[in-house]
Amino acid sequence: MFVVSIAALKRNSAILRQVKEAAGCHLVLALKGFSCWKAFPYLRDDLDGCCASGLWEARLAREHFRKHVITYSPAYDETDIAALCEFTHHLDFNSLSQWFRFREQVMAHPRFLNGDLQCGLRINPECSTGQTPIYDPCVAGSRLGITADLLAGADLTGLSGLHFHTLCEQNSDDLEKTLEAVDEKFGRLLRSPQFTYLNMGGGHWITKPFYDRERLIRLVREARAKFGVEVWLEPGEAVAIHSGVLRATVMDVFESSGHKLAILSISATAHMPDVMEMPYRPDVFLVDPAASDDKPAVMLSQENYHLAADPSAPGAIPKSLEASHTYRLGGPTCLAGDVIGDYSFPRALRVGDTLVFDDMAHYTMVKTTTFNGVKHPSIALQHEDGSIEVLREFRYEDFESRLS
């Protein structure tokens, strides 16, 4: 079961509200990171709206968040544009070819003519600051955003905003480097009266304890003053971070080639794909009815698993932190690599034990699949009084109807 804490969501959104008010900017929820719409009422007062990655997310924002809608997609078709022109407030394009294809249609729409609809262009400042290549849109040959050289001499009639999104789980020092590149390559455009907004995208870890929020506030204020534009931020993870868990049941325990293995009721590939894509390793808690409180497992990486016996080996986990029972946790699918990781626990795992994976609300529920027909976890909200409201339980009919 996915369980999302309303109290944690409200704690995050309160921090975001303080930041946006201090910086004088707008801040929206990125639905690609968190789109559990039954939780929207608890975020709506603090945030300015949502950003969407296409028509369906935009519709979700309009119907359930009911505030400002920003839409960006690497490509649209005629049906997308016709529908989005009716309600989105920002419509950002990925390339000049897409903009030129739809410019006449968009600019003739009454909402564009009266100013309710504004259009922007995603830019690529060619400034890589992240560590994970799959999440770097600034690599050479990137399909996301347009580089400055391609804008030289281009007819930009109808555009009023620029949009960049280059960060992923990063601090504001990386935003500062990115803004320097944006100013160097696109500052001339931003300073012209034609451009009225700058979207700084997401990937800002604003609600993390170590995040330098004062620097972010300063950077936003400086950008507003320097370019004379409205600034928009669109975090997803920062809204939902540390607000949800995924509860799993141990289905089997056995040994293979000297490794202890535990098969769980949840799957990395089907239910928590960031474990394989990012890569991301969540904290795990063993719910032990015999204990006075739940104790977190000591997580061992693949490397540390083999090094742990030698305390002097580089990267070895100190003996004081090791628990006595280490297991490789895996899912119930046929994929050989459906492995969450190696973890140590204070006692031997048993069939029927409950394990709780932390930080499973963002970029998890939005990516789940029904691969192998594995049972999909239910989705629930935990209210501030501790009560659990089950929002959705998935049944065989959901799996059956998906591809029919």
Image (tube, rainbow, N blue to C red):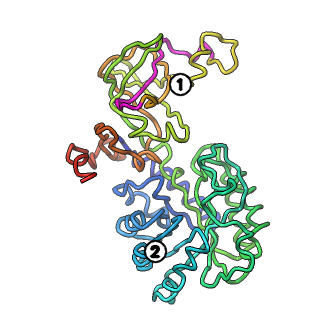
Residue 55 x %, y %: 42, 67
Rounded to the nearest angstrom, the CA distance separating label 1 from label 2 is 44 Å
Amino acid type, mark 2: Thr
- Magenta-highlighted residues: 318-335
- Residue at point 21% right, 43% down? 396
The residue at 42%/77% (across/down) is 87
Residue displayed at 39% across by 64% down: 56
Is residue 130 shown left or right of residue 248? right
- The residue at which mark 1 appears reads as 299
| Residue 334 falls within the magenta-colored stretch | yes
Across and down, in percent, residue 152 comes to 75, 76
Q: Is 201 colored magenta in this rendering?
A: no
Between 91 and 258, the one lying in front of the other is 258
Q: In this figure, which residue is indicated by the disc labeled 2?
A: 88
Q: Is residue 252 above or below residue 247?
A: above
**Tag on residue 28?**
none
Residue 214 falls left or right of residue 261: right
Q: Earlier in the sequence, mark 1 or mark 2?
A: 2
